[in-house]
Image: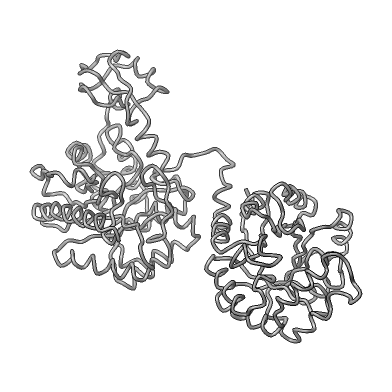
């Protein structure tokens, strides 16, 4: 799918009710909704209706226009106000003569619009095009042959047609959105949509049809007196519209072979099933189906691959209750001494759980491990009697304080706040014991993703909170976060610790962090920031690394190399950094840590193949 950049224009029209203050409010609301632009209308009151006109409805419309008039100087000042906020500003004219009322002030506008009723007014269109600004042409109420005639007389560049149905409002049966894609094919140019729909959601469908501009009237009150309010949108509707517009590319992605996102993989593991042993089985025996039970979680062989392993003898003596995994049938090759040496040299570490730490320490004696703890483990006694004092360690806080709440030591919910602080204190006690045993600092990594205030205040509170623990010789490192997190089986947009402005605030507040490179790659793909600039900003703040590769905006935990050369270069550039570098490949612990071994081999090979 092509890159989609949908811009939302809030048409103020006559919904200011002739009030300069109301117009200012509407502009501020458009800015708050993160829209692209606002647009005004202007008619010279002496240049609208002919005095002898007696058509039905004339007096209604004429009265509305008269009572909702803003002067050129008022519109000019409002345009300047909007631009100071960062909005683009446009205006609709109905007659080229009316442009004279603005004298030398027309240059303030970023674009112009020709309304549907003046679509065939080539004098007006050409006058606006001559001003060197982009012109939108609304097609409401026009016959196809008239549309084609006007198009044929226009220059190649400088304008865009807007599909429009000139009803006020348009019923849900009548937007005829297929004309957008038809018009794109017909003209070979971008097309927009001027919406007067009763249902604002129709604009989302217009985006799906390929509209790159959505123009819709904005109002303070949809039920106010006046002709345009009922076919307009409130600020809340515009915020929703802007949300869809800014995410449309991601919403419409997927027109290629699919890869499940990390949240799906987590759900597949937690909700899916695999085979477990019902009995103790002797080495060199063949498994039989009656030896197996099919249960959650899915961490071993499943229905798709169990049959081939029923024909292979076991190479170990597995016990009752363990998942059936490939490594039971395959000889485990030890990691080479060269890889162990290189891993120690560049401070690679493996994530472990309390229950599998000793097994992985024996399989991969690289001298560095990060304990990933669950909230239940933290609240129980943690045995440190078998900790190897020669290793380096770090500890990852649980993301949750219970089965329904995230860790949040700043929460406005007192219970959540207290439980979070209690959990952090319990982990700190464990870390103090590790530091006593090893004689080294043991950093704590935490994902603090809940924001209850503005960012500046958030990082200020962050700094104060972390300093309390530094005074106790405990170093808590906030983790760099992804744009989308996988919590409680779903995906949640995150707004903290994942963009360049966060990097600037982290640097300014002198906060030490754990840089998760997989998360950083996802954020780069989502926000389009310069990864090198971001890493340069945070160079002195990065005290710990998590290493994995990533794809797109939601695919994390991949083996190094999957994301391409750009990601490989970043990872390679950080292998010399003086800190622990924890390998975070997805499900690396399965099959006796086969993926961990692969990553240790890959990273050691990358490092040893350097030309210097």
Apparent side of residue 583 relative to residue 182 in the rendered image (left or right): left
Count the labels in the image.
Answer: 0
**Residue at the spot 69% in from the left edge and 71% down from the top edge:** 14
Examine the rendering and report whether any part of residue 342 can be seen.
Answer: no
* Colouring convention used in this rendered image of the protein: one colour
Apparent side of residue 149 relative to residue 575 in the rendered image (left or right): right
Q: Nearer the viewer, residue 89 or 515?
A: 89
Task: Name the image quarter holding residue 36.
Answer: bottom right
Residue 57 drawn at (x, y percent): 82, 65
Is 550 situated above or below 259?
below
Q: Nearer the viewer, residue 16 or 303?
A: 16
Task: Name the image quarter holding residue 324.
Answer: top left
**Residue at the spot 57% in from the left edge and 68% down from the top edge:** 30
Q: Nearer the viewer, residue 67 or 24?
A: 67
Residue 305 drawn at (x, y percent): 40, 22
Apparent side of residue 248 relative to residue 435 in the rendered image (left or right): right
Apparent side of residue 425 relative to residue 253 in the rendered image (left or right): left
Examine the rendering and report whether any part of residue 222 can be seen.
Answer: yes
In the rendered image, the quadrant that contains the C terminus is bottom left
Q: Nearer the viewer, residue 538 or 330?
A: 538
Residue 333 drawn at (x, y percent): 27, 31
Residue 6 drawn at (x, y percent): 62, 58
Is 415 situated above or below 295?
below
**Residue at the spot 71% in from the left edge and 81% down from the top edge:** 107
**Residue at the spot 67% in from the left edge and 77% down from the top edge:** 18
């Amino acid at each position: 799918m092509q890159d989609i950049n949908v811009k939302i224009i809030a048409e103020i029209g006559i919904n200011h009710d002739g009030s300069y203050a109301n117009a200012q409010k509407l502009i501020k609301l458009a800015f708050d909704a993160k829209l692209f632009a606002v647009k005004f209308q202007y008619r010279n009151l002496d240049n609208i209706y002919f005095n002898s006109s007696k058509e039905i409805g004339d007096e209604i419309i004429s009265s509305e226009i008269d009572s909702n008039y803003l002067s050129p100087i008022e519109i000019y000042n409002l345009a300047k106000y909007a631009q100071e906020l960062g909005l683009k500003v446009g205006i609709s004219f109905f007659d080229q003569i009316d442009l004279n009322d603005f004298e030398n002030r027309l240059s303030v506008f970023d674009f112009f619009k020709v309304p549907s009723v003046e679509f065939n007014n080539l004098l007006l269109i050409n006058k606006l095009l001559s001003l060197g600004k982009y012109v939108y042409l609304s097609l409401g109420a026009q016959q196809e042959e008239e549309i084609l005639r006007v198009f044929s007389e226009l220059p190649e560049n400088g304008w865009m047609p807007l599909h429009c149905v000139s009803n006020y409002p348009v019923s849900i049966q009548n937007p005829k959105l297929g004309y957008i894609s038809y018009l794109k094919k017909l003209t070979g140019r971008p097309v927009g949509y001027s919406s007067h729909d009763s249902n604002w959601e129709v604009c989302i469908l217009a985006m799906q049809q390929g509209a790159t501009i959505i123009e819709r009237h904005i109002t303070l009150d949809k039920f106010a007196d006046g002709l345009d309010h009922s076919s307009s949108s409130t600020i809340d509707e515009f915020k929703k519209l802007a949300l869809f517009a800014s995410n449309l590319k991601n919403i419409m992605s997927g027109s290629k072979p699919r890869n499940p996102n990390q949240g799906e993989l987590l759900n597949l593991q937690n909700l899916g099933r695999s085979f477990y042993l019902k009995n103790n089985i002797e080495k060199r025996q063949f498994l039989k189906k009656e030896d197996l039970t099919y249960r959650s979680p899915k961490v071993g062989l499943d229905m798709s691959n169990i049959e081939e392993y029923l024909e292979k003898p076991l190479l170990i003596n597995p016990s009752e209750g363990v998942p059936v995994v490939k490594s039971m049938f395959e000889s485990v090759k030890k990691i080479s001494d060269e890889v162990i040496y290189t891993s120690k040299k560049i401070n690679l570490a493996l994530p472990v759980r309390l229950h599998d730490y000793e097994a992985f320490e024996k399989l991969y004696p690289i001298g560095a491990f990060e304990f990933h703890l669950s909230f239940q483990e933290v609240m129980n006694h943690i045995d440190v009697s078998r900790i190897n004092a020669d290793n380096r360690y770090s500890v990852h806080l649980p993301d949750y304080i219970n089965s329904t709440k995230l860790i949040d030591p700043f929460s406005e919910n007192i219970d959540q706040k207290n439980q979070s602080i209690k959990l952090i204190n319990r982990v700190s006690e464990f870390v103090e014991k590790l530091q006593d045993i090893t004689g080294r600092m043991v950093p704590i990594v935490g994902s603090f993703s809940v924001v209850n205030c503005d960012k500046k205040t958030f990082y200020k509170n962050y700094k104060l909170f972390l300093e309390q623990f530094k005074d106790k010789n405990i170093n808590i490192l906030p983790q760099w976060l992804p744009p989308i997190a996988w919590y409680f089986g779903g995906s949640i947009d995150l707004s903290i610790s994942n963009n360049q402005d966060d990097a600037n605030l982290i640097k300014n507040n002198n906060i030490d962090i754990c840089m998760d490179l997989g998360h950083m790659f996802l954020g780069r793909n989502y926000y389009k920031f310069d990864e090198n600039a971001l890493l340069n900003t945070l160079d002195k703040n990065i005290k710990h690394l998590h290493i994995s590769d990533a794809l797109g905006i939601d695919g994390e935990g991949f083996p190094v190399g999957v994301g391409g050369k750009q990601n490989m270069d970043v990872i390679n550039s950080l292998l010399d950094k003086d800190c622990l570098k924890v390998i975070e490949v997805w499900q690396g612990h399965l099959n006796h840590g086969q993926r961990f071994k692969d990553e240790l081999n890959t990273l050691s090979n990358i490092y040893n193949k350097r030309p210097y």
